[in-house]
Image (cartoon, grey):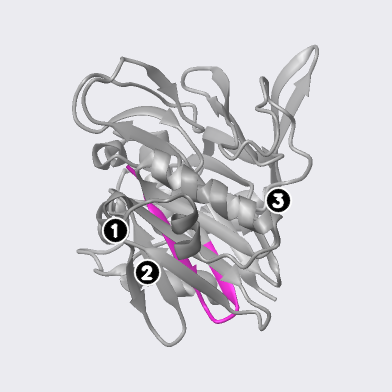
Amino acid sequence: MTIILGAASPSKAAFLSDLLISRTGGVVPVELEFPSGRRKRSEPGPKQPVRLQQKMYVLGPRHVVMWAGDVKVAMSIARELLRMVERGEDLILGDAFKAVRLTGKVSEGVAMQLWTQVDDGRSVAQSLNCEYEEEVDARVLYAGSGQWHFVDSIEFRGEREGAYRGALHGVVMPRLAAALCDADLGEMKALNFAYGGGFEIGIMHNGQARKLEYSVRHWDYDGSALLSGPAYRTWYDNHHFFAMSYRPEEKRMSGVIVPDPLDRSAAPTRLVAPTRSSDLTIHIIHLADGSRMRPFYHVGAGGYEFEVILEPDRVGFQEHITDDLREQIKTHATAQVPVKMIRPQDWVNGHPFLDD
């Protein structure tokens, strides 16, 4: 019912988790709305989506915990870890399990990653029931029902034939773009593997752990004209997740709130406007012949801004894009791309939003 992935170099770490909670059998039909504005009605059957929930928690400036599996068990552990932070104790995953009196058999139903940035700047992980691969320059841990679909199924719409295998040879940011595209425009195949719906991205660097606020914009390019497609923006306020989307084909705007399950502040009843620009903008370009899709990234706004407007007499957004960025997108759409894909260790070694 999840994908969680953490990748760390000696001094930097990046994290990814989805927002979907699924259940097998006995599901009361419900229509879910995702951050992208897509909607999905659940029906009785295997792995049906029932709600959205955050599964990545920043516990102070140096700790991030993520989970997959049993919701009740995972939340008991996460709350105990938060109490340990508030008491000023060292965070030990095993101690948290003992404190909530969970048996070994119960723990088999949950996978967890607890990442800590220690005094010398290294990001170290404690984990339970996670897969991992390690090289000299990076360590990658992943878990959840979606792990093999996300990490291994990385053929990228004609960019290359076949696929790399294994966590360190998977796509992270491009694979995220592919997953976002499927969630935004496609058949929502990730839901068949009980993950997806929306994603959170986190980083840990220079003694600061935080989640990234990001924007996603789809473009159609026919070789001359660059046409706007769906767009959405995610942000946080008091640990609560917010998203606003616009789907031009439906002429519809919508908003989503996913409250902080650790209850560190009262759950919001309406959207709260973001207070800063996006940390990361993901442009996804669709070529007119349908042969391929290409991601194009900017740190911060990068010439594009998705401004959310929440005023008494006006609710919506304004979009700003520079002519220079339009030309960059067109150039990227037609440029030759290397066969080698971005791997998780490349994600944390040299990616702009993690540079010193």
Q: Nearer the viewer, residue 283 or 279?
A: 279
| Picture coordinates of residue 300, whole percent (x, y) | 69, 54
| Residue 289 disc label | none
Mark 2 or mark 3, earlier in chain: 3
| Picture coordinates of residue 317, whole percent (x, y) | 69, 27
Front tag of 2 and 3: 2
The residue that appears at 56% across and 37% down in the rendered structure is 261
The residue that appears at 55% across and 82% down in the rendered structure is 10
CA–CA distance in space, label 1 to label 3: 29 Å
Taking 287 as reference, is 247 left or right?
Answer: right
Other-residue count near label 1 (Cα within 10 Å), few / some / many at <14 / 14–19 / ≥20 = many
Amino acid tagged 2: Met
Classify mark 1: helix, strand or loop.
loop
As for residue 205 lying within the magenta part, the answer is no
Q: Which residue is mark 1?
A: 154
- What segment carries the magenta color? 1-14
Amino acid tagged 1: Ile
Mark 2 or mark 1, earlier in chain: 1
In this orientation, does residue 283 appear?
no
Taking 8 as reference, is 271 left or right?
Answer: right
Amino acid tagged 3: Gly
Q: Which residue is mark 3?
A: 303
The residue that appears at 27% across and 64% down in the rendered structure is 160
Classify mark 2: helix, strand or loop.
loop
